[in-house]
Amino acid sequence: MGAQVEFPANRTRILQALTVVTVLGMILTFYLALFYAGTDVEQGNVQRIFYVHVGAFTGGATAFFITVVAGIVYLVTRNRAWDHLALASVEVGLPLMTITLITGAVWARPIWNTWWTGDPRLNSMAVMWLLYAAYLTLRSALPNPDRRARLASVYGILAFVSVIYVFIVIRVRTDTLHPVVIGPSPVNPSAKGEFEVRTDLHIGLTLGIGSIFWMLTAITLMWYRLRMESVAERVETLKMRLLSQQ
Amino acid sequence: MPPDTTNYMILGYAVTVLILAALILYLVIRARNLRAELRMLETIEKEGQPPSEPVARTNTSASGDALSR
């Protein structure tokens, strides 16, 4: 027998099925966003960025929520597999949040006439991105696996506060340009930009379906990343064994 | 008549596809490298010395594809 990292066949089949569903779902998501949803009268086609901008945030926030859950379970059980899941979720969540940041800037250029501005939502989003990038740096700076897992778990749990803040900041601050798309904005009633999400079936359906498949994309990629970590752990174990034999 | 902002839409979607593709490529390449490293280490452990030929070629039939299981 060669490579000894084996995965249960039934789980592999589930992962393969999930991959197929995710790929088809993302094709559908892009199709709906580009061809099914109507063109915004005021903004033109750039408004279609909305569907990837919000969708990628949904996927990224899902990944970061899994970081919290994995961190809590690791601190309770000290089972390293949960630390691996936390790492996988940040490594997948961060690129998705990068998509949200960059598409937001691209969208802002023709609508706000600037790529970036000192808006509370934009700044808090950038801080959140940096916090999760620092999570990866923190891990690489800690050589002791137990200490690394413990500290990373605590950090991953605390960092989620930034995700919550990003979500609520446009609902509690009045000095923001960013529209409130989901739910009311009691503090800032002038914040418009719902794009008739709740009344236009095309927009609501495109956003809803898109968000589900962005979440599935995050979960599928995390699963592959998690499997990779199992192989990496096996490699490390073998290395240590060979070194101890010398 | 809506304004023509199609170029920005294309830029936004291009960035999205590029980042997703880069993430998938990173996962594929890293998984492939890890599998190759694992095969090499197992060969060393089995034979007690490093292989003279590229490991992927010498051990492919026995090892199978760990990540595809």
Image: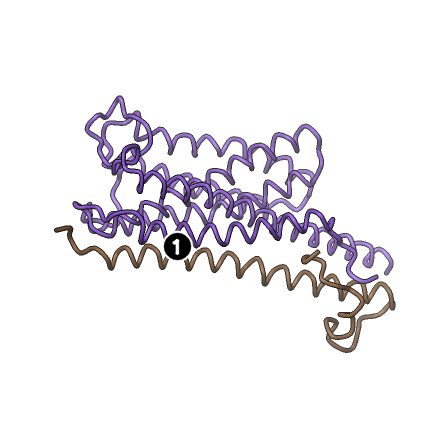
Chain colours: A purple, B brown
Q: Quadrant of the C terminus of chain B?
A: bottom right
Q: Is A206 positioned to the left or the right of A75 in the image?
A: left
Question: Residue A68 sits in which quadrant?
Answer: top right
Q: Nearer the viewer, residue A199 or B7?
A: A199
Amino acid type assigned to the residue bearing label 1 in the image: Thr
Question: Residue A243 sits in which quadrant?
Answer: bottom right
Instruction: Farthest residue to the top: give it.
Output: A186
Q: Is B13 positioned to the left or the right of A232 in the image?
A: left
At x 53%, y 42%, the residue is A135
Query: Percent x, y for residue A101?
Result: 36, 47
Judge whether A80 appears above or below A232 on screen: above
At x 25%, y 22%, the residue is A187
Judge whether A3 appears above or below A78 on screen: below
Total tally of numbered discs in the picture: 1
Judge whether B48 appears above or below A129 on screen: below
| Subunit under mark 1 | B
Query: Percent x, y for residue A28?
Result: 42, 51
Query: Percent x, y for residue A206?
Result: 36, 44
At x 84%, y 55%, the residue is A244
Q: Nearer the viewer, residue B48 or A200?
A: A200
Q: Nearer the viewer, residue A190 or A113?
A: A190
Query: Percent x, y for residue A153?
Result: 60, 35
Q: Residue under circle 1?
A: B16
